[in-house]
Image (cartoon, coloured by chain):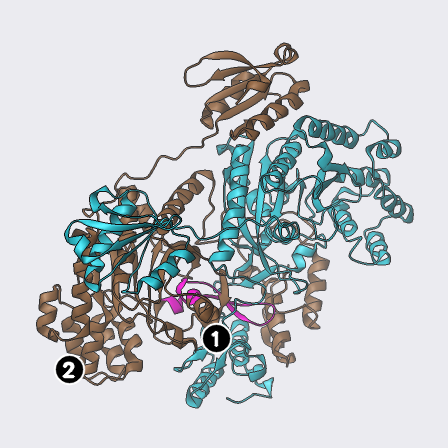
Chain colours: A cyan, B brown
Amino acid sequence: MRAITNPSFLIHYHHPSVASAVIRSLRHRLPLSAPSFIKVRALSTSASYAELDNARTGRSGSLASPPTSSDFKQKIDVNPPKGTRDFPPEEMRLRSWLFQNFREVSQSFGFEEIDFPVLESEALFVRKAGEEIRDQLYCFEDRGNRRVALRPELTPSLARLVIQKGKSVSLPLKWFAIGQCWRYERMTRGRRREHYQWNMDIIGVPNVTAEAELISSIITFFKRIGITAVDVGFKVSSRKVLQEVLRRYSVPDNLFGRVCVTIDKLEKIPMDDIKKELRAAELSEQAVEELLQILTVKSLEELEEKLGSSVEVIADLKQLFSLAEKYGYSEWIQFDASIVRGLAYYTGIVFEGFDREGKLRAICGGGRYDRLLSTFGGEDVPACGFGFGDAVIVELLKERGLLPELSPQVQNIVCSLDQDLQGAASLVAARLRDKGQTVDLVLENKPLKWVFKRASRINAQRLIIVGSSEWEKGVVGVKMLSSGEQYEIKVDELE
Amino acid sequence: MRAITNPSFLIHYHHPSVASAVIRSLRHRLPLSAPSFIKVRALSTSASYAELDNARTGRSGSLASPPTSSDFKQKIDVNPPKGTRDFPPEEMRLRSWLFQNFREVSQSFGFEEIDFPVLESEALFVRKAGEEIRDQLYCFEDRGNRRVALRPELTPSLARLVIQKGKSVSLPLKWFAIGQCWRYERMTRGRRREHYQWNMDIIGVPNVTAEAELISSIITFFKRIGITAVDVGFKVSSRKVLQEVLRRYSVPDNLFGRVCVTIDKLEKIPMDDIKKELRAAELSEQAVEELLQILTVKSLEELEEKLGSSVEVIADLKQLFSLAEKYGYSEWIQFDASIVRGLAYYTGIVFEGFDREGKLRAICGGGRYDRLLSTFGGEDVPACGFGFGDAVIVELLKERGLLPELSPQVQNIVCSLDQDLQGAASLVAARLRDKGQTVDLVLENKPLKWVFKRASRINAQRLIIVGSSEWEKGVVGVKMLSSGEQYEIKVDELE
């Protein structure tokens, strides 16, 4: 391997994709920029030269073609790529338990499950409003020179599907999804680059009855897994509060999303920068001050005093709180004008589930996005929804000691006492499975001590032993592992 | 917008990543190479110039930063990216049904579910054996200049995890996964670029009892969904057949994977090319002939005649067929030496599920891969597994008229007859959900005709009507939708 220190030969290439391929090809030869996790034990020098030659003559293939590996064994990093997770059985049990709860709650609210590709066109996510989510887009160029991105959220895909379905579906749609989302974030405090997100969306209902139903479903989920209103609350506001202020200062509508996104950064960037951004959006000094002022409002009464009782947003919020009472979740929710949410497309009610101890980031969040479809060239349909990640909730459950104990569960373990009886044991296992039983079949000739250890590890209830003298009589030995009870049973009678 | 026809200004850039960024940035300005799905309605000329200027001065950002969108609305393509799928409710029901069957079968065999990141290090998949899968790798470079790939299969990730777990897990491991896999294929005959794959793997069992168990689980799955041995069969062989031939001609071990991969292409590329590839691997004319000859063998007896009865592969295959008899699936399987499979890492038994009418591609396939872990720098552990995609099986079910009828199922639909009773309806819905019922709550004030139509669309069994005179008495109206039976019931007594 040798480093190439003079990249000036690039001037030979007049075709962009060739030059780019060369650059990429070279990068793989340069020790410093080679992926650090690949430790190539040996590399044929001639192969290396041959490749370099290919690069020079522009024959190194398409833009994203894989580099050539050596003939020799590689030592790979056994960890998943930075920011991602493996799910070995113990982690997977927790994930399945969580998803099952998401699913059952969604279904109890009459929602139907949907999904979209994890890889979408980048265009779907590129909104010009200064959103954090856009800066963190996990985007690539594929082999067909298409700009694609691993989805950072599910709502744009949902909007795309709703436009696609058009008049062929009857409104309202009540759809939920549990999908993996990606953000290329700086890795801090256990933040990962992928997470799963539970989404529920109601498409076609303009009334806040929809938001009330969504919040009810999240609270149903919390209760189900043991979380109470003492642990978690919802802060609720409406973007129409800000809209009302902007309207009074004649700020053009098309700046609305950008202003909201800026204001959402209040706790993340210095106030001076916020003000600078707002003034850059052509807001007057006075408008900026009034915006910042209204964000401090913590009660509906005070908001009504400031905005007057005739504005739409007051009626919306009053109805929402009244519905919350009927649903029986008043103690979970509170008005808080500082809640804005970071996505550009929200237009009405916004809400956020938070840990009352204030230790964790937002647990979930959502709101109304009545104008998203038209930004994609579709006809607008009233819509609202929420996203609920799989990370913060698990942290919360841990904090509260509410993580479920999930252990492997196999009803039977079947083993033969003799190599020659392996087929007989297979027959017994097949028979039990036919009867709906779960069976771990011991596939090698192992001492009973080993079998008992395994039985205990998988929490088997019953051990079934196939021994030769019993087998000749058409029976097998059974040991109930909790009681220690032992008996023989005819194979035909096993259930 | 204007096209730039003279890319020769590239010579100004001496830093690869800057040049690359410029190339990419320009590509987005060139009408011909802009992603065809973005139809920008309007684009500010000045913005365009400003960007161009940024590009010229090399300030256009990092390698994979997103292009700047215009301030104006975009018309997006409402279809998912080429080769990918949306899952609207009707498709999702089928997928969930399929996955549920995968899951239940795996669990009845005592397997535990696992998963890995869909985005892995490219190094995990780059094997130098001429595999089709490698040419189709969906690979990228991420923002941190890491070579990553959307996984084309699950086995390498599994091997990575097994190495990572090391001595902390007790063998054998019986793990299953249902994960999305990606291949950048040329799009033909309904082939897609992503599919879901069900995998079951047994790690730590050197004996063919493991392969017999895996095949049994696939057959259990087939039977469960109505597919019989008349529809589907398994062709079984062992890579040790080829290994035996290569051994006799003293072909070095390290060529084994490559020879197998070449032979697997027999039905895809011309015989002359196969022979050329084999001779390139330094096989003698005679070795090539004998290899091709042995592939035509269709019975164990004939194989035994050719190889002699003392070789390991004969004992393996005999044991497998004998176990198949005990399990009761002899009629499903047949020996066929032409089965090799296209992945480089298989070392022993290989098998393939096929449609007996011969209309479809392989339904599933798998085998033993006892030496995969050491190619990653780990210690080898005997292992075998299979992959079962979600595409061909659905085609087969369609062909045989076996696709299940899966319709939405919500037990109750609740509606209020009066806008003011929306809260009361919420209360009724919440109450029913508390009792474990699934409820679609009508969120707007709609005429009863509309409600009945919706009830029928979601297959509701019961309509619950909240009317004002009844509500004052603490009762609601119930209509059983199948029988038409109608009655009133106290809210407290609703179950």
- Same chain check for tags 2 and 1: no
Residue A117: tell me if it is visible.
no
For the record, the magenta segment spans B133-158
Q: Disc 2 is attached to a residue of which chain?
A: B
Of all chains, the one bearing label 1 is A
Q: Is residue A183 above or below residue A108?
A: below
State the residue in front, A92 or A476: A476
Residue A76 is tagged as 1
Question: Helix, strand, or loop for circle 2?
Answer: helix
Q: Quadrant of residue A212?
A: top right
Identify the residue shown where x is 63% and y is 24%.
B427
Circle 2 is placed at which residue position? B286
Report, in whole angstroms, how far the alpha carbon at label 2 lies from the one at label 1: 38 Å
Q: Nearer the viewer, residue A215 or B298?
A: A215
Location of residue B199 in the rendering, given as x and y in whole percent from the top left corner: 37, 57
The amino acid beneath tag 2 is Gln
Q: Is residue B161 magenta?
A: no
Front residue of B79/A213: it is A213
